[in-house]
Amino acid sequence: MKTNSIYLAKLQVGEVFNFIKLIIFILSPVPNLNARLKELVTGLAKTMADMEGVTSSPTYIAETKNKKAKDAKRDSEYLCFKTFIEAFIHSSNPTTYEAANLIFKALRDAGNVQSMKLDKETTALYGLNDLFTTNERYIAALQALSAKPMWDAVMAAQAEFEEVYHLLSNVK
């Protein structure tokens, strides 16, 4: 039987490994292989079994823990910011009261950001950031409450989360 050439150079190690395991699986049970081919298949099967013993599939436990930690930090920073703004709603100063209500309404309209899926949370935070950095009323409200550094901390935590999230996504 004549076959076309198979070029393994462009395949990744895992793909070659799985290809060889498939060949062994197909050829091992065939009863009428010649002695030399049977010997080669048996030797290859033993080598592959030995290789499976020393190679392990990658685990991303540490990276996943880091991602969860960065998400928890992002959630914590957001909750601190939201609580800080919410405290000003009770102010007797009309300017402070108005600024706090303006920002808090935007936070309320964004929904329960901390319990959203990771990508939705990112989208919500960027939407709020766009509002808080481009709309003059919100910029002034943040300044009136001295809340700009706290919002910057939320976005810094967001950037840290994204760095880990994208790194983990690219590795997997």
Image (cartoon, grey):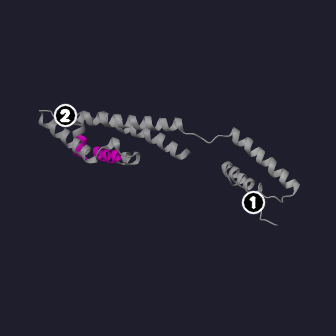
Residue beneath disc 1: 6
**Numbered label attached to residue 88:** 2
> Amino acid under label 1?
Ile
Residue for point 73% across, 52% down: 20
> Amino acid under label 2?
Phe
Q: Earlier in the sequence, mark 1 or mark 2?
A: 1
Query: Is 76 one of the magenta-colored residues?
Result: no
33 is higher (above) or lower (below) than 84:
below
Tell me the quarter of the picture where residue 118 sits. top left
Give the x, y percent position of residue 14: 66, 49
User: Left of 31 or right of it: where is 162?
Assistant: left
Which dot, 1 or 2, sits closer to the camera? 1
Which sits in the foreground, 50 or 155? 50
Q: Secondary structure at mark 1?
A: loop
Q: Quadrant of the N terminus?
A: bottom right
48 is higher (above) or lower (below) than 9:
above
Tell me the quarter of the picture where residue 122 sits. top left
Q: Are marks 1 and 2 in contact (CB under 8 Å)?
A: no
Q: Residues within 10 Å of mark 1 (few under 14, many from 20)?
A: few
- Main secondary structure along the magenta-highlighted residues: helix
Q: Residues within 10 Å of mark 2 (few under 14, many from 20)?
A: some
Residue for point 75% across, 60% down: 6
81 is higher (above) or lower (below) than 123:
above
Query: Which region of the structure is painted magenta?
Result: 124-140
Residue 8, can we see it?
no
Give the x, y percent position of residue 77: 34, 34
Which sits in the foreground, 112 or 83? 112
Residue for point 24% across, 38% down: 142
